[in-house]
Image (cartoon, rainbow, N blue to C red):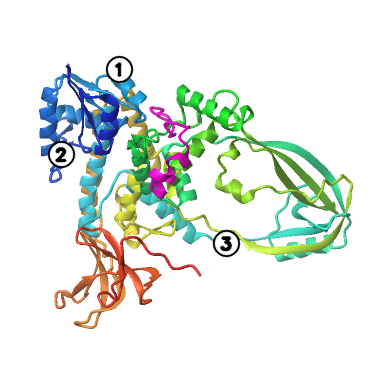
Amino acid sequence: MAKYLVIVESPAKVKTIKKFLGANYEVMASNGHVRDFPKSQFGIDVEHDYEPKYITIRGKGDILAKLRKEAKKADKVYLATDPDREGEAISWHLAAALKLDGKKMYRITFNEITKTAVKDSIKNARVINQNLVDAQQARRMLDRMVGYRISPILWAKVKRGLSAGRVQSVALRLIADRDEEINAFVPEEYWSLDAVFQVKGEKKPLTAKFYGTVKEKMEIHSKEEMEKILEAVKDASFVVSDVKHGERTKKAPLPFTTSTLQQEASKVLNFSTSKTMRLAQQLYEGVDIEGQGTIGLITYLRTDSTRISEEAEQMAAFFIKETYGENYLHQGKVKKDTDKKKIQDAHEAIRPTDVKRLPAMVKDSLSRDQFRLYQLIWKRFTASCMADAKYHTTSVKIDGGSYRFTVASSSVAFDGFMQVYVQEEEEKSGNTTLVKVLDQQAELTLKELEDKQHFTQPPAHFTEAALVKTLEELGIGRPSTYAPTISTIIARRYVAKEGRNLYITEIGEVVNHMMKQAFSSIVETDFTATVEALLDGVEEGTINWKTVVSNFYPDLDKAVKKAEEELEKVQIADEVSDVICEQCGRNMVIKYGPHGKFLACPGFPDCRNTKPYLEKIGVSCPKCKKDVVLRRSSKGRKFYSCEGYPDCDFISWKKPEEEKA
């Protein structure tokens, strides 16, 4: 009997795929990448046509030895790494590291981990796509060049441990520019005016908003302008000058891409981008469902396409007709987002692998957060295949003297997709209905005028969701890069996250200033977007990958040499804490080590006292009412305990919350 070996990236997929393929298939995992650039060297030979140097990643020797042993025994080896550029490159590295014979080596990809998809992929096995590999190699080399040439300058001029990155530096600049915009913002005064009317025969009053004159819309900028209007309308006779009835359509949403999933999960579930991707990966790779075994619940999570397969569309159509009725089904083919110029369209949108697998059916087999994310994906996909919602609208113009007030209302005529999925802004607005159907020329009695002073607000700080949206709109990065980019700038402490908002730190400002001063092209959004377009050209086979690399490096090298000579050293002051050093009486400062924050005496080397930094989480100890602090175990795992430890023995692996009254 023939023997086949299937190699996947993640051990989590092994059990799921093995179940689909039968006894003559062995399924093993590479545990991600197996080869990379050496850590101690640049790894790119700029003198010899930019040849990359790859070595086996430390710790992967045993895995590769086991894979080689099985590969020798197999009649065919199927490389089933993820269906994207990075996955293609991992397959290419595996083929090289395992010295696979091209005649028995095949590349397979599947957009979802289901029996049908996995078996179809084996039927449609192909050779490795070198264009995809080269696009990934070029990206990796560009990132390596920026990181390995610029980071040492930051170490020398600021402090060790800092890093620069091709995409992260642009993300940092966006946040820095927004913070500067907020700091420079000058509020402007404006006023609003509401008129409260009594309608004949109605108990409930009607509130209308100031529009302007009967001829044109106008803004109220000062108290003087407001007083002039109040004087003119307080004794005026008010009459309904126009009533318009209409219908408004709200289109069903598109299914999720990586970017829109990250944005919606942030807004609705308050998930960070990295948490969303981690949970989505689990749902994609497979979850143990009671009575059914391990099942992949969603399709591949890294995509910028809103396309869905005909099979999925037909399955959704049948489900919607059976569950909600034919009038709830979207008429015609489900729309696709064709406006975006940068869509790769290599994968489908993110959707459930089986729309009939309702969130409630799998709830008991999922963690709370897995369930919430699956439910969000299921609802969004199902809604995308449903009919548009329809509203009845009414708009009324009310004139008094030479001024006009307006009131508008809407009510749902047909809920359509909103039967399943209501977006946050829709929930907040809801239905607005007039007190009654008003007739044209009806006279109204003015009860009250409500004038309010306002000031314009500065732009909002970036949230993770808003930053992802901006990066995507500017064409910076790709679906797989958003979450790691944001995680990196937070981990490097260039950016602080408070609540949902991202704020640039002092060290972030210094790094951003240096990057703008010495490497202005790298932090230009247009330049970074152009590089992404060039990488897309490599993937399509229209641009040679070494051309991209060789055009980039000489300018970088020149800028690095200039920066080494001209940039001045910057001293970053340590953050002073309120903890007093018991040995010398100074206020201890917060330092950063390999395992995070710690407290050190600023009197070093005379005083060498250090102690753990205990970060308060704003919750009182349930036993003694002192503060609960965040600590780390010897293995680096977070836990929470009373700051009075060991006198108080309260401890919890889960983050405690203050009791609600």
Q: Nearer the viewer, mark 1 or mark 2?
A: 1
**Residue 357 visible in this rendered orientation of the protein:** yes
Question: CB of mark 3 within 8 Å of CB of mark 2?
Answer: no
Residue 332 covered by magenta stretch: no
Residue 556: x percent and y percent?
25, 42
Say whether disc 1 or disc 2 marks the residue closer to the N-terminus: 2
Rendering coords of residue 202 (x, y %): 85, 55
Tell us which disc is closer to us: 1 or 3. Answer: 1
> Residue 67: which disc?
none
Any part of residue 254 in sight? no
Measured in 3D between alpha carbons, the distance from the residue under mark 1 to the one under mark 2, in whole angstroms, is 38 Å
- The residue that mark 2 highlights is 43
For label 2, the SS is loop
Amino acid under label 1? Lys
Q: Main secondary structure of the magenta part?
A: loop
Amino acid carrying label 2: it is: Gly
First reached walking from the N terminus: tag 3 or tag 2: 2
Question: Depth check: 542 or 295 in front?
Answer: 295
Q: Secondary structure at mark 1?
A: helix
> Which mark, by number, is residue 187?
3
Looking at the picture, tell me which residue is in the foreground, 401 or 318. 318
Tell whether 454 sits left or right of 528.
right
Residue bounds of the magenta highlight: 342-371
Is-magenta flag for residue 346?
Answer: yes
**Residue 141 vs residue 327: left or right?**
left
Q: Earlier in the sequence, mark 1 or mark 3?
A: 1
